[in-house]
Image (spheres, rainbow, N blue to C red):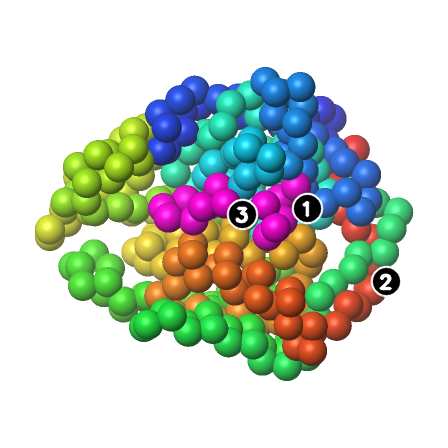
Amino acid sequence: MAGPIEFSGIGLHTGEQSSLRVLPAPAGKGIVFRRVDLDNFELRADVASVARVAYATTLMSRGVWISTVEHLLSALYGTGIDNAYIELDNFEVPILDGSAFPYTEAIARAGIVRQRALRQYIRITKPFVLKEGDKTLGIYPSDTFTIKYDIDFPHPLIGKQSLEVQLRGANYAQHIAPARTFGFYHEVEKLQAGGLIRGGSLENAIVLTEKGMLNDISLRFPDEFVRHKTLDLLGDFALIGQPVLGSLVANRAGHALHTRFVAELLESTSHWALDTAAEASVSSAR
Ligand SMILES: [Zn+2]
């Protein structure tokens, strides 16, 4: 892209204003946050930095934290960007419209540059599955990277939804990125009392009531909910730090299971192998 891509807005949980810029980074650097308000303190987007995963994913290193990273990391991973610096001037990534669409739109406008390095993949060689109560997350050998997600919420607008998508070309930008965050109106007070969703509004979330939703605009997809769950999963899965060849299958998972899954998969070295494909690695800018 001709220059960095820039965004600003309020954080979903803190309600604080912040600005961020995504800049190109050299091959092999990975995705690195920089707190420009703290002398460019650097924090790598990897699973070792995960601090808290209640209603959003927070990274922390030496007492410095960055919260609600999952939609931005999802957009970068979903569009195949391996290396980028993310400059942020506060501790929470802005929520924007509650989806990853503003990111994928800006990335498409800016363009992606192929770098002169071989792209290293994690190739899944043996199934790896984690269960937590009625939640399941697994990954299986495959020559491509695909995600299948199933949810079942007892709500008239949701019910059973299932999505399967192969992460290639514009599939992420078209089918996953536009899906917005959702929450339940009856949980708003409890969450706010816990210091959460202070920046939440109908501008950045679908708010579900007992029988419908508060928003007076229509859903972006009839199954927007399972698409957003897929968006969130991919944002947490991005903490694996490398592209993956495997088929990811989720059933009612959540941030805590996602990040535990990535950490345990990385440690389970008999389930995967590094594979260097004769394809260039990619960055966010030229
Ligand atoms: Zn989300």
245 left or right of 183 in image:
right
Q: Which mark is residue 282?
A: none
* Real-space Cα separation, disc 3 to disc 2, in angstroms: 31 Å
Tell me whether the residue at label 1 lies in contact with that at label 2, contact meaning CB atoms closer than 8 angstroms: no
Instruction: Tell me which residue sits at (47%, 73%) in the image.
Output: 130
Residue furthest front in the image: 62
Number of marks drawn: 3
Label 1 sits on residue: 81
Label 2 sits on residue: 278
Is 180 contained in the magenta span? no
The kind of residue tagged 3 is: Val
172 left or right of 223 in image:
right
Instruction: Rate crowding at label 3 as few (under 14), some (14 to 19) or many (20 or more) other CA atoms within 10 Å.
Output: many
Instruction: Tell me which residue sits at (35%, 25%) in the image.
Output: 15
Label 3 sits on residue: 50
Q: Earlier in the sequence, mark 1 or mark 2?
A: 1
* Real-space Cα separation, disc 1 to disc 3, in angstroms: 20 Å
The kind of residue tagged 1 is: Ile
Query: Which quadrant holds residue 197?
Result: top left
Instruction: Tell me which residue sits at (50%, 45%) in the image.
Output: 51
